[in-house]
Structures are given as C-alpha cells and as structure tokens.
Amino acid sequence: MNNCGSILYIFWYASENVMTTEIRERAGKSKDIIKKDGKTFFEFTNRTTAFDGVKKDEFAHKGEVCCKLSAYWFEIMESEGIPTHFRAFVPPNTMEVEHLEIIPVEVICRNFVAGSLLRRHESGDAVPAGIEPRLGAKIPDPIVEFTTKFEAVDRPIDYEEIVEKGWLRREELDSIAECTRKVNNILKRRLSDKGIILADFKIEFGKNSAGEILLADEVGTPDGCRFWDLDSYENGEIVSLDKDVYRYDKGNLSDVYQRIYRRICE
C-alpha cells in the first residue's frame, strides 16, 4: 500500500491486561489505512481534493457515503464473480479489507466524453477514432485506459511502459481490462434502473500474498465515478451527481453525495 506517513497508536486495556497496537497510515488523498490485530481496515475520511491536490476541503458525511457505497458495490461485484479485497463493513465509515500490494496503475473506463479525455483533446491530442470530441458525447464502444498512480501528477500510460517497468505482465493487463469492462457493465445496468448515467469511472487493483489480482480501494462512489442524471441528459443538460460539483463549484458536495447514495441504495 502507498505509505504517505504513518502514526503508531498503542492502547492499554487494563481489564484484559492486553496491549493492542494500531498502526494508522494515510493512504492517498481521502483514506486512512488502519492495521490492528492482524487485520487491515480502510477508513474513508471527509477529505476532498481535486486537480491533483490543488483544491482541498472537507465535507460532512462524504467519507460515510463513499464507504457505504463501496461496500454496497463490492458485495455486488463478489456476487457477480469479481474477486475483491472487501471483507466487511464497519459502520459508519470503515471497511475491513484483505491486505494487498496496490498495483501502481489506475484503470479508467469511459462511456461518455468528459474529464481528462476532453482536456487532452483541447490541448491538441487526438481522440480515438469514432469519438466526437464534445462534452457529453456518447462513446460507441467503451474505452479502457491506464494512468500512473503514485506520481506527483498522474499521466496516461500504455501497455508497453507498464510491462517494461515490471508492474504487470501483458496477460495480467488483459485480465484487468476484461474485469474493468465487466465492472462497467454491472454498474451501467444497475445505475440505469435508477435513472443515472455512468459517464466514466476509475478503479484500482492489487495483488494478495498468493499473487492473485483483486479489485481494490473503492468502487461505484461519486469520488471515483462520474454520474449524470439521465432525465436531465435526455433534455440536453448535464447535471452532475459526483465530485464535479466540487471541482467546478456546481453545488454543495455533502448534499449531492447524500442524494446519490439514496438514489442508488434506497
């Protein structure tokens, strides 16, 4: 796991005459990792960042919403045959997970034109053939891309560089791409029933002690997905139900996150 500084907490329980050690590590921008009694936990915090950490804030309920949604989707992914690191939800904003070595690559799946794909086009890069370079344009066949994870500013990366750096073998990349497409199909199908468009999303994978690749970190949250309201889109308007409300000052993030949680889970 990416260790961005760790704090060691030691607690003494006199009644049991047992010393319990808790190690807390800051994992990326919005989560903490807790290691306690041989188990690993992810604590989802209220920390919020955008534009590679240039913009930073905290919002009430944000960690709780993302944790609950991740637990909800991880259970669905497991039921659909996708192995994940999820083990148990620990209310209100923590989950027990299997310890993994996170692969230093993020995987992005795109169904509509938005975000960095559009920014790259505006900077002069060509978009893939058959894709209209316009915000909100539907991508005929969803595309899977890879970016670096632990660099100061993440960047697109191709198969050749990933293999050359020794992060993954080509067949492992093929398996991850296939798994990502399956995750996409599961999310799209279920979100469509809720009147929600999945424009794009990013996910991570890691390897356990047996060398198995598992879906990791979080899935199906407004932090890691771009959600749009379906009715509004069909009427020619893009209404964001995700972190874009914070990135582009479109509304109150706490309110939007709680609304998307209710739409998905209730």
Image (cartoon, rainbow, N blue to C red):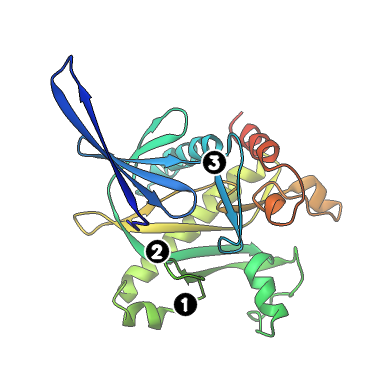
Q: CA distance from mark 3 to mark 2?
A: 29 Å
The residue that appears at 32% across and 56% down in the rendered structure is 1
Counting from the top left corner in percent of width and height, residue 88 is at: 36, 33
Kindly identify which residue carries mark 1: 157
The residue that appears at 47% across and 41% down in the rendered structure is 44
Q: Amino acid at mark 1?
A: Ile
Closer to the chain start, of discs 2 and 1, is 1
Figure check: 127 above or below 262: below
**Callout 3: SS:** loop
**Callout 1: SS:** loop
Q: Amino acid at mark 3?
A: Asn
Which residue, as the protein is rendered here, is positioned at the far top?
15
227 left or right of 180 in image? right
Closer to the chain start, of discs 3 and 2, is 3
Quadrant in which the C terminus is drawn = top right
Kindly identify which residue carries mark 2: 176
Camera-side mark, 2 or 1: 1
Mark 3: few, some, or many residues within 10 Å (few <14, many ≥20)? many
Kindly identify which residue carries mark 3: 46
Q: CA distance from mark 2 to mark 1?
A: 15 Å
Residue 55 location, quadrant: bottom right
Mark 2: few, some, or many residues within 10 Å (few <14, many ≥20)? many
**Callout 2: SS:** helix
Q: 219 and 176: which one is in front?
A: 219
The residue that appears at 66% across and 45% down in the rendered structure is 192
